[in-house]
Image (spheres, grey):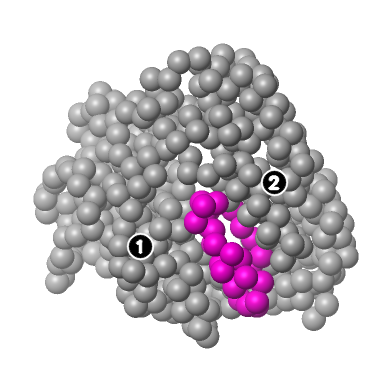
């Protein structure tokens, strides 16, 4: 990581900069960290839809659609200011640099290690590209007093057959517990109420330092200024019973788990090079629901993976139908060069993938409606945000149900006890304030 310059000033003219972030919550946390560096360098941050001197596109390559969005953002930036400097940072310069160079040879391309030196590179021209992702860069989101997303881990050692993340972000790494706690204190000093712990594979936290995610969570719980703590996605084989019990015993940890499954067929899980069986996943979900009956349990599903025949899809669908999960993020398989899945035979036709996706989306909606109905008349705590929706203020319950009540400035960034009454046609629950 490049050292910070002592003084970065652009007087007498203040330049403008805009950023567009694609992909995961980790990218958003990192974008905030990078833009704070630009603010210190006296850049003025403007919306990406405005004309700017510098446009930054924080890219994602998980799917082809993500790459298409990156190219579209480049073209939008060029249209808004043909003279602007455009930087594309993150995963796409690591994985598909050639496509970006074909789009525009003048683009500044920085991979996941170099992107944190972007302010110095913009001002002083210290441009270099490398795919060596060896240093952990702590990051957190800012500009929102309600919650902050804190990056505790980066990279992945799993090498799932469909995934480019190990190629784009390198091997798993993290800071130690003490360094992470210092980052948390910095991230929460603006008074945010909720901390979201995120990373590429957070269950791997501390494994190279004889530490663990469980030990970190115990220490985070002790930080008095944090009222609520959530986990982002965690692999089923790394979600321990100790972590689940900690969530049940502590009032700070929110009963909300996102556990990627990807397929309910063991045959497909093996082809995906996942490190668990469908039975292990079911055991983790059932353990959560036994200990925390009102917990929200979400998952990710990929449909149309090479080799997935009708029997495999039906097996996976039936498995999901029986599990007490709350909703699903459904993804259609997207081929990625450089992955093992790219070379697998028995590709699934696009029209079949579409049919399977639609069926899974419908199942997800059914699961969500049932989960919401289970919570009707339940009393719980909600953290209200500042967003206004047709005259209502929005927030999330402890178990991640989107709720609303009539807007009041007194509710912004406040945790209030409520009773869930009913769900409107927009899929948001009405609540009755109890205090």
Q: Position of residue 22 (x, y in %)?
A: 44, 43
Q: Quadrant of residue 194?
A: bottom right
Side (left or right) of 35 relative to 129: right
Q: Which residues are magenta?
A: 230-258
Q: 308 above or below 388?
A: above
Asked if residue 9 lies in the magenta stretch, the reply is no
- Give 328 or 270, whichever is nearer the viewer: 270
Instruction: Name the residue at 51% across, 21% down.
Output: 306
Instruction: Decide if residue 62 is in sight here.
Output: no
Q: Position of residue 279 (x, y in %)?
A: 63, 44
Side (left or right) of 254 relative to 195: right
Residue at the spot of label 1: 207
Q: Label 1, secondary structure: give it.
A: helix
Instruction: Name the residue at 79% across, 52% down.
Output: 371
Q: Quadrant of the N terminus?
A: bottom left
Q: Quadrant of residue 208?
A: bottom left
Residue at the spot of label 2: 327
The total of numbered circles placed on residues is 2
Instruction: Name the residue at 58% across, 34% down.
Output: 266
């Amino acid at each position: 990581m490049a050292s910070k310059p002592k003084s970065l000033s652009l007087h007498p003219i203040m330049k403008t900069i805009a950023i567009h972030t694609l992909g995961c919550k980790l990218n958003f946390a990192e974008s905030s960290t990078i833009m704070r560096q630009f603010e210190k360098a006296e850049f003025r941050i403007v919306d990406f839809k405005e004309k700017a001197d510098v446009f930054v596109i924080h890219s994602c390559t998980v799917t082809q659609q993500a790459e298409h969005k990156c190219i579209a953002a480049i073209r939008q930036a060029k249209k808004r200011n043909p003279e602007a400097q455009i930087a594309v940072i993150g995963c796409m310069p690591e994985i598909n640099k050639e496509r970006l160079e074909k789009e525009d040879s003048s683009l500044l391309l920085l991979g996941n290690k170099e992107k944190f030196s972007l302010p110095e590179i913009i001002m002083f021209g210290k441009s270099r590209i490398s795919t060596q992702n060896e240093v952990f860069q702590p990051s957190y989101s800012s500009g929102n007093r309600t919650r902050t997303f804190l990056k505790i881990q980066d990279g992945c050692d799993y090498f799932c057959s469909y995934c480019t993340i190990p190629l784009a972000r390198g091997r798993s790494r993290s800071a130690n517990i003490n360094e992470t706690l210092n980052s948390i204190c910095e991230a929460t000093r603006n008074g945010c109420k909720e901390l979201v712990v995120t990373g590429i594979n957070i269950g791997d936290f501390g494994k190279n330092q004889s530490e663990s995610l469980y030990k970190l969570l115990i220490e985070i719980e002790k930080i008095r200024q944090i009222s609520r703590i959530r986990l982002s996605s965690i692999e089923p084989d790394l979600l321990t019973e100790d972590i689940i019990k900690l969530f049940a015993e502590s009032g700070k940890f929110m009963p909300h788990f996102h556990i990627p499954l990807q397929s309910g067929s063991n045959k497909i899980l093996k082809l995906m090079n996942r490190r668990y069986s469908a039975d292990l996943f079911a055991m983790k979900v059932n353990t959560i629901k036994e200990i925390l009956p009102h917990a929200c349990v979400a998952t990710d599903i990929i449909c149309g993976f090479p080799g997935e025949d009708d029997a495999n899809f039906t097996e996976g669908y039936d498995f999901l139908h029986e599990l007490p999960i709350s909703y699903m993020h459904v993804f259609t398989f997207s081929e990625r060069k450089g992955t093992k899945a790219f070379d697998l035979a028995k590709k699934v036709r696009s029209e079949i993938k579409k049919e399977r996706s639609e069926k899974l989306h419908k199942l997800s909606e059914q699961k969500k409606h049932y989960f919401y109905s289970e919570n009707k008349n339940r009393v719980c705590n909600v953290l209200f945000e500042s967003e206004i929706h047709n005259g209502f203020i929005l927030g999330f319950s402890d178990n991640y149900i989107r709720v609303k009540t009539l807007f009041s400035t007194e509710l912004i960034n406040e945790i209030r006890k409520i009773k869930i009454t009913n769900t409107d046609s927009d899929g948001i629950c009405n609540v009755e304030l109890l205090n």
